[in-house]
Amino acid sequence: MHSSKDTQFISSLYVKYSSDVRNFLRARYRCDDQLDDIVQETFLKAHRSACWENIKNPKAYLMRTAKNLFIDLMRKKSRNLVDYSDTIEDEHSDINNPARTQLADEEMYLLSVAIEQLTQQVKTAFVLRKVYDLSYIEIAARMNLSVRTIEKHVANGLAKVAVSMRKQKAAKNTNNTTHKTKALALVQNRQKL
């Protein structure tokens, strides 16, 4: 267990460095939606695990902890995306069912549109990681970039693809509802004639 002295020490670190950690995450990863959670978890993890007398640069330690937490979060989201795509494949694997085949094709189309919207470097890193399953180190070597930059590109790509697919589906659902409403109005008008 941690003593009250440890708690006071981590509290003083929070006061001193929490805005630095927040700004670091915001600038590097643009993760505003999870920013507060990651900052809080950074200090909780540091409090639970750090042997502070061995740490020469607390700020660097906290930044590294925040970065690792962000990467873990993106990996979890990435696994969820892979699980989601596996579910889509499972649900739509019946090749004798044209409706399911069409739905799977539409999902793949939405994914390809989302990927095409990425910047070239983000797209390349994302595809090499998610489609070709290369490691971050292999991608960094191929693209002549740092592993940290590749991690950032893949995380950005994952977030942007997820947002784009949600927007495309919402727009499609809105269009389908509009088309159905117009078709129903046409049918009703024809019945009146």
Image (tube, grey):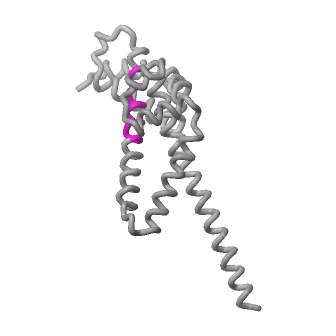
Relative to 79, residue 149 above or below: above
**Farthest-out residue, top:** 56
Quadrant of image for the C terminus? bottom right
Residue at position x 70%, y 85% in the image:
188
Judging depth in this view, the residue of 72 and 84 nearest the camera is: 84
Relative to 106, residue 39 above or below: above
Q: Total label count? A: 0
Residue at position x 38%, y 55% in the image:
89
The magenta span reads 64-78
Judging depth in this view, the residue of 127 and 44 nearest the camera is: 127
Judging depth in this view, the residue of 107 and 175 nearest the camera is: 107
Quadrant of image for the N terminus? top left
x, y percent for residue 101: 45, 63
Report the magenta stretch's main SS: helix
Horizontally, is 81 left or right of 114 in the view? left
Magenta residue check for 10:
no
